[in-house]
Image (tube, rainbow, N blue to C red):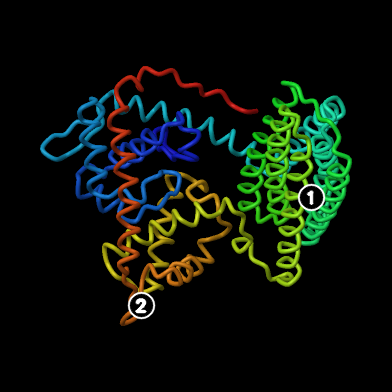
């Protein structure tokens, strides 16, 4: 790789945490490599797909905005329609390259199965100890039960490890779901008994802090496991991510119950615990049924969490924009997406679409089927065309893009050139 050959990976979260910079670096990189006119850039980015760039595509109007503001900021020089990077523009590109080399090492360290198991184990030990202690101190059965539930989650970490070691991923997922069902049943029994006894709960400030930390940590672990699980095709991690969703529900219920206890209303704590345990049991039964019926043929992209919806939407938006430009057959549309994703990988590495496993082979046919059921397009003469509903969705997506662009052009300035960049590495 050449010294200035920039590949932007995980741009939205790691590249100075500025999406506007991520998009500019793509344009700067293309100009540096010789795509130095407006038409060349339009042609070059016509097939690009990258979810974390935030824009659906770098369309001519959005590209013009990036070029014009970069010229105003002294980062690009425009000589009769031929673009070149100024010294400041090259400096910014060089800084990005240094940063990305560091970020790649960080991503390689954190986005793997062993690291997430260690982090999950440490979080569970921390949470279970504090919740059990604070539950006993405050008299909150819900908080104590949640601490015990976190303690039993430690067993699941070892189940995931063993399923990875002996390549019994699906079996590990089934065992985890059975644990989840058992936990839900025990929680329901405990909550009902607490409702009958109506014990007094006396929370303090530290109790509220611990529960809030629990919600935050479980939210982080849910997304973390989902990303690693999708990338590694690990069903056990994805199943455990579902359990993190349940932990968030439990912690939120405990928090609500504790708030009511401040007003001497103690039974709410048990009622919420009963309701949440019922949700856990229902969700566990449905997921366990899916795992068993699917057998060994289950596909990783078919294993859905609630948080998957936004990632499907990004691909749907790309499809809407592509069909708005020109009606295509499903086969041609699928081929175009694969080509666009290939270019996205060149700039963003695997993080161009981290939420799907091996989509270059599986394609987007399943998403197309879902969009057709929603009435976003119709098929005529072997080509698909947007319906009025699809066109409406397209313009809504474009409105979001233009709002994003307005913020970008307003906030981006030369001050980024002087901003210190931390390129510390993870060994």
- What residue sits right under mark 1 in the picture? 160
The percent position of residue 181, horizontal first and vertical second, equals 81, 56
Residue 422 to residue 100: above or below: above
| Residue at the front extreme of this rendering | 264
The percent position of residue 142, horizontal first and vertical second, equals 80, 38
| Residue at the bottom extreme of this rendering | 381
Q: Residue at x 75, y 41 (%)?
A: 117
**In front: label 1 or label 2:** 2
Relative placement, left or right, of 248 versus 37 is right
- Assign the N terminus to one quadrant of the image: top left
Crowdedness of circle 2 by 10 Å Cα count: few (<14), some, many (20+)?
A: some
Residue 289: mark in rendering: none
Q: Are marks 1 and 2 in contact (CB under 8 Å)?
A: no
Please identify the quarter of the rendering in which residue 259 is found.
Answer: top right
Q: Residue at x 71, y 67 (%)?
A: 290
Q: SS of the residue at dot 1?
A: helix
The percent position of residue 22, horizontal first and vertical second, equals 39, 36
Crowdedness of circle 1 by 10 Å Cα count: few (<14), some, many (20+)?
A: many
Please identify the quarter of the rendering in which residue 382 is found.
Answer: bottom left
- What residue sits right under mark 2 in the picture? 379
Q: CA distance from mark 1 to mark 2?
A: 44 Å
Please identify the quarter of the rendering in which residue 244 is found.
Answer: top right
The percent position of residue 248, horizontal first and vertical second, equals 68, 42
Relative placement, left or right, of 168 versus 312 is right
Query: Is 322 or 77 nearer to us in this picture?
Result: 322
Query: Is 84 or 164 nearer to us in this picture?
Result: 164
- Assign the C terminus to one quadrant of the image: top right
Query: Is 133 or 8 nearer to us in this picture?
Result: 133
Relative placement, left or right, of 298 versus 288 is left
First in sequence, mark 1 or 2: give its number.
1
Q: SS of the residue at dot 2?
A: strand
Q: Residue at x 77, y 50 (%)?
A: 277
């Amino acid at each position: 790789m050449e010294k200035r050959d920039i590949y932007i990976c995980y741009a939205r979260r790691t590249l100075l945490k500025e999406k506007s910079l991520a998009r500019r670096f793509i344009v700067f990189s293309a100009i540096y490599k010789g795509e130095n006119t407006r038409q060349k850039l339009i042609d070059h980015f016509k097939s690009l797909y990258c979810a974390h760039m935030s824009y659906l595509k770098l369309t001519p109007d959005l590209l013009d905005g990036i070029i014009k503001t970069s010229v105003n900021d002294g980062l690009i020089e425009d000589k009769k329609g031929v673009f070149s990077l100024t010294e400041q523009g090259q400096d910014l590109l060089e800084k990005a390259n240094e940063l990305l080399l560091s970020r790649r090492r960080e991503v390689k360290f954190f986005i793997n199965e062993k690291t997430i198991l260690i982090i999950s184990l440490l979080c569970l030990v921390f949470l279970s100890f504090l919740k059990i202690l604070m539950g006993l101190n405050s008299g909150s059965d819900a908080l104590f039960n949640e601490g015990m539930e976190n303690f039993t989650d430690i067993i699941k970490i070892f189940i995931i490890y063993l399923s990875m070691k002996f390549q019994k991923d699906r079996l590990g997922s089934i065992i985890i779901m059975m644990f989840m069902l058992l936990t839900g049943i025990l929680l329901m029994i405990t909550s009902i008994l607490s409702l009958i006894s109506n014990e007094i709960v006396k929370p303090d400030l530290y109790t509220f802090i611990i529960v809030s930390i629990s919600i935050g940590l479980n939210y982080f672990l849910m997304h973390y496991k989902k990303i690693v699980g999708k990338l590694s095709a690990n069903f056990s991690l994805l199943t455990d991510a579902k359990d993190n969703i349940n932990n968030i529900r439990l912690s939120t219920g405990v928090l609500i119950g504790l708030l009511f206890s401040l007003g001497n209303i103690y039974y709410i704590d048990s009622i919420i615990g009963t309701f949440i345990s019922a949700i856990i049991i229902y969700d566990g039964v449905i997921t366990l049924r899916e795992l068993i019926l699917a057998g060994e043929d289950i596909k990783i992209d078919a294993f859905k969490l609630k948080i998957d919806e936004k990632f499907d939407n990004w691909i749907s938006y790309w499809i809407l924009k592509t069909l708005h430009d020109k009606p295509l057959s499903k086969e041609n549309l699928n081929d175009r997406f694969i080509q666009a994703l290939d270019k996205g990988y060149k700039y963003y590495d695997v993080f161009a679409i981290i939420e799907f496993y091996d989509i270059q082979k599986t394609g987007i046919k399943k998403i197309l089927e879902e969009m057709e059921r929603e009435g976003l397009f119709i098929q005529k003469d072997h080509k698909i065309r947007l319906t009025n509903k699809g066109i409406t969705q397209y313009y809504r997506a474009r409105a979001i893009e233009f709002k994003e662009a307005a913020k970008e052009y307003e906030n981006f300035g030369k001050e980024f050139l002087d901003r210190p960049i931390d390129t510390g590495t993870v060994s």
